[in-house]
Image (spheres, rainbow, N blue to C red):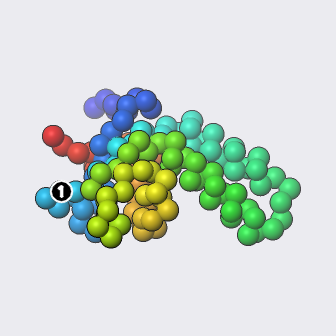
Amino acid sequence: MAIISFDRDTVIDYAPGYAGNRESMEPCIVRLKFVPYSKVQHYSRLIAARTKGISDQTRITELTQEIQKRQFLDSVDSISGYYVENREVTDPAEFYETADTDLVIEIVRAMESMSKLNEGQRKN
């Protein structure tokens, strides 16, 4: 069987499995781009370059988190069906700042994994 991948410029509607979201009548949908291995390596090289020569573990963690946030913001186009209090959040930066850690990690793993992205791809 052939392996079919996503083009890195195609925006994909992804429904996270977090907290039973996929089974919801109106699931949260994250519109994101697939991040191929070459792009993952690019972000890894950025982390290595920014942390080179730094021995302070707190600073290394901060720099790593900055790059990870950049990857998220570079790859997520928009969000729908995500609410903080009674207000819908559609901006990727605000989503990143307010979403549960497990939800953000699931989305990052999905954008880096063709099989996980297929699992949660919204079926029309």
Measured as percent of width and height from the top left, residue 9 is found at: 43, 30
Q: Is 72 displayed left or right of 15 in the figure?
A: right
- Residue at x 75% of width, y 64% of height: 59
Measured as percent of width and height from the top left, residue 117 is found at: 34, 46
In the rendered view, tell whether residue 44 sits above or below residue 97.
Answer: above
Q: Crowdedness of circle 1 by 10 Å Cα count: few (<14), some, many (20+)?
A: few
- Residue at x 56% of width, y 43% of height: 40
Q: Nearer the viewer, residue 109 or 87?
A: 87
In the rendered view, tell whether residue 8 sits above or below residue 120.
Answer: above
In the rendered view, tell whether residue 115 sits above or below residue 4.
Answer: below
The disc labelled 1 sits on which kind of residue? Glu
Identify residue for label 1: 26
Q: Is residue 116 visible?
A: no
Q: Is 15 displayed left or right of 110 in the figure?
A: left
Measured as percent of width and height from the top left, residue 21 is found at: 24, 62
Q: Is residue 124 visible?
A: yes
- Residue at x 42% of width, y 68% of height: 100
Q: Nearer the viewer, residue 48 or 85?
A: 85
Q: Quadrant of the N terminus?
A: top left
Quadrant location of residue 4? Answer: top left
Q: Nearer the viewer, residue 1 or 85?
A: 85
Quadrant location of residue 124? Answer: top left
Residue furthest toward the front? 87
